[in-house]
Amino acid sequence: MIIKITPDMEKVKSIIRMVENREKFLKRINVKEFPGIFAENLYEIIKELATALLLADGLKSIGENSHKDLIDYLSNYKDFEKEEVLLMNDLRIKRNKRLYEGRNINFDYFLSKKEKFDKVIKKLKEILKNKYNEK
């Protein structure tokens, strides 16, 4: 469920700093050796950027399906194509299966989708940057 809140730019800044730290971490690990850990952190980057974007808009996702609602909400932004939202949801599902069912994530998954994930992250950052400059 998406609810209205007061926009919180301080929290947005804090989340962006966390994202930067995760990105530094991902540059240091071997995705081929640790694809599951890479997936978890890649998903967290996307989720945190999406969370920051909603916070900047005065919104927040809550409840049992909050992560799914958060990603689905991104389809409201004209910047995201349907396939990109589906890709983010696919990563969410893979990450959840790894965490809650112990399933592995294959390195080839990232090999074939690296450019797409990079594009999604870049878009999220660009939208956030524009929102931040508006405030």
Image (tube, rainbow, N blue to C red):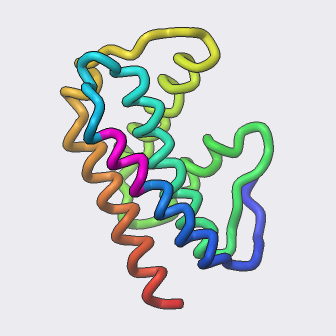
Residue 110 vs 85, above or below: the answer is above
Can residue 34 be seen here?
Answer: yes
Residue visible at 47% across and 31% down in the picture: 40
Residue 91 coordinates in the image, percent (x, y): 44, 32
- Residue 57 image offset from top left, x and y in percent: 61, 75
Magenta range is 20-26
Q: Is residue 110 above or below residue 62?
A: above
* x then y, percent, for residue 62: 76, 51
Q: Is residue 106 magenta?
A: no
- Residue sitting at 40 percent across and 81 percent down? 130
Closer to the camera in the image, 83 or 34: 34
Is 74 on the left-hand or right-hand side of 78?
Answer: right
Res 90 visible:
no
Residue 49: horizontal and vertical position, in percent?
48, 58
The residue closer to the viewer here, 108 or 89, is: 108
Q: Residue at x 36, y 46 (%)?
A: 84
Q: Which quarter of the picture shows residue 127?
A: bottom left
Dominant SS in magenta? helix
21 inside magenta stretch:
yes
Residue, x 68% and y 78% (percent of image)? 7
Count of labels shown?
0
Relative to 74, residue 36 above or below: above
Quadrant of the rendered structure where residue 8 is?
Answer: bottom right
Relative side of 14 to 119, left or right: right
